């Protein structure tokens, strides 16, 4: 299975390069009131970046289950309408806690993209924060300067939330070709479908305060996140994250149960995508201790479930559908996330 292979090879590469493999934390950050859900691999290391706690390793790698609904990073309304957004996804990451910084982070990301993922080096376009001359120069060891694009804060300065660790970032985009739009470079690509972002390298340098002030972190660090489903889509050469093995497997099961055929460009296709995505989000939220309710995290879960059920209804399902899909999900993801 592509997803399992890529997850495994990614973790192995970083283990071979001195990183400790750490298990995913829960999708619910029970001890962090600033966050509704785990939105990135770095969440479980927030205190380490801030210098408030210490681990017996300086390099780590994870495959982190993430939920981006509510809060600063919210993709709920995009799901169903685009072919690359998910409320639940897996983020592959490597982390340095005051150990290596930009040069090695860029080198690792380049090696993994081209050798482990096997992507075409000529189609990778790095972006950098407009003021980050150092990252711009470092990328030139791998790609010509005219393929490196500068962006402002909105795209290339990453923050976990309204407060906490943050820093300039550098993204790796993959040119999927003219069938995905006429834009000839990342600046022109307003939809982000042609130049697909698949990896973000954050150079963690600041702790954002409530008044917006940026205080330097004790040690410059690295936090990276690659969207596993996007990498698998690129690797499989498919148009959408919903064509990757796990999500397409769930969609196949929705077809079996509902008797409706999935056609990616059909008017009913968004319903299949919403159901497959929301099933994963709901299942992982419940597994990590959230229950549907009228407030807070439980309310968001209820909204996700209700939206999934509504789309099942739109497909003509007369009986509960999500529960019948769950065993398929368990078969596909239960081993990685028992
Ligand atoms: N924290 C960054 C992100 O979520 C990189 O992992 O994009």
Image: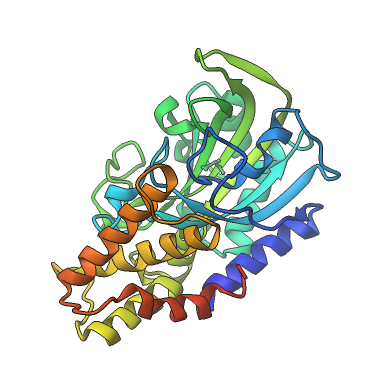
Horizontal and vertical percent for residue 228? Answer: 51, 60
Horizontal and vertical percent for residue 139? Answer: 59, 38
| Along the viewing direction, whichever of 101 and 183 lies nearer the viewer | 101
Horizontally, is 93 left or right of 306 in the view?
right
Horizontal and vertical percent for residue 237? Answer: 41, 69
Q: Does 297 sit above or below residue 231? A: above
Q: Residue furthest front?
A: 294
Assign the N terminus to one quadrant of the image. Answer: bottom right
Question: Which residue: 70% across, 53% down?
Answer: 61
Question: Which residue: 39% across, 46% down?
Answer: 69
Say how the picture is coloured.
rainbow
Q: Residue furthest right?
A: 56
Question: Which residue: 57% across, 24% down?
Answer: 133
Horizontal and vertical percent for residue 277? Answer: 37, 63
| Along the viewing direction, whichever of 326 and 262 lies nearer the viewer | 326
Q: Quadrant of residue 190?
A: top left
Assign the C terminus to one quadrant of the image. Answer: bottom right
Quarter holding ligand 1: top right
Q: Does 42 sit above or below residue 159? A: below
Horizontally, is 83 left or right of 96 in the view?
left
- Whether residue 102 appears in this view of the structure is no
Q: Does 332 sit above or below residue 160? A: below
Q: Quadrant of residue 264?
A: bottom left
| Along the viewing direction, whichever of 231 and 61 lies nearer the viewer | 61
- Whether residue 31 appears in this view of the structure is yes
Question: Which residue: 62% across, 42% down?
Answer: 42
Q: How many marks?
A: 0
| Along the viewing direction, whichever of 51 and 174 lies nearer the viewer | 51
């Amino acid at each position: 299975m592509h997803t399992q292979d890529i997850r495994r090879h990614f973790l192995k590469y970083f283990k071979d390069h001195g990183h400790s493999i750490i298990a995913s934390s829960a999708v619910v950050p029970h001890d962090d009131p600033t966050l509704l859900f785990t939105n990135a691999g770095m969440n479980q290391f927030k205190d380490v970046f801030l210098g408030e706690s210490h681990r017996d390793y300086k390099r780590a790698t994870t495959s982190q289950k993430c939920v981006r609904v509510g809060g600063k990073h919210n993709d709920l309304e995009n799901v169903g309408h685009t072919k690359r957004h998910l409320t639940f996804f897996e983020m592959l990451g490597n982390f340095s806690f005051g150990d290596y910084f930009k040069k090695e982070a860029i080198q690792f990301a380049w090696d993994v993209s081209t050798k482990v993922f096997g992507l075409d080096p000529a189609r990778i376009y790095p972006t950098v924060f407009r003021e980050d001359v150092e990252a711009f120069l470092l990328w030139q060891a791998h790609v010509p300067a005219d393929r490196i694009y500068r962006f402002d804060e909105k795209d290339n300065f990453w923050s976990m939330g309204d407060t906490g660790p943050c820093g300039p970032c550098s993204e790796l985009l993959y040119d999927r070709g003219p069938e995905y739009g006429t834009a000839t470079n990342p600046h022109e690509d307003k939809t982000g479908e042609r130049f697909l972002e698949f990896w973000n390298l954050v150079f963690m340098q600041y702790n954002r305060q409530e008044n917006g002030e940026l205080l330097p972190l004790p040690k410059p660090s690295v936090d990276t996140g690659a969207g596993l489903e996007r990498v698998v889509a690129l690797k499989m050469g498919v148009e959408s994250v919903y064509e990757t093995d796990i999500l397409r497997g769930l969609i196949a099961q929705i077809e079996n149960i509902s008797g409706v055929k999935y056609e990616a460009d059909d008017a009913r296709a968004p319903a299949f995508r919403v159901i497959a995505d929301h099933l994963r989000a709901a299942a992982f939220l419940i597994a990590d201790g959230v229950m549907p309710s009228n407030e807070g995290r439980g309310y968001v879960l209820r909204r996700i479930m209700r939206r999934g059920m509504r789309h099942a209804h739109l497909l003509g399902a007369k009986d509960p559908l999500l529960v019948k899909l769950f065993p398929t999900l368990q078969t596909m993801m239960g081993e990685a996330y028992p």
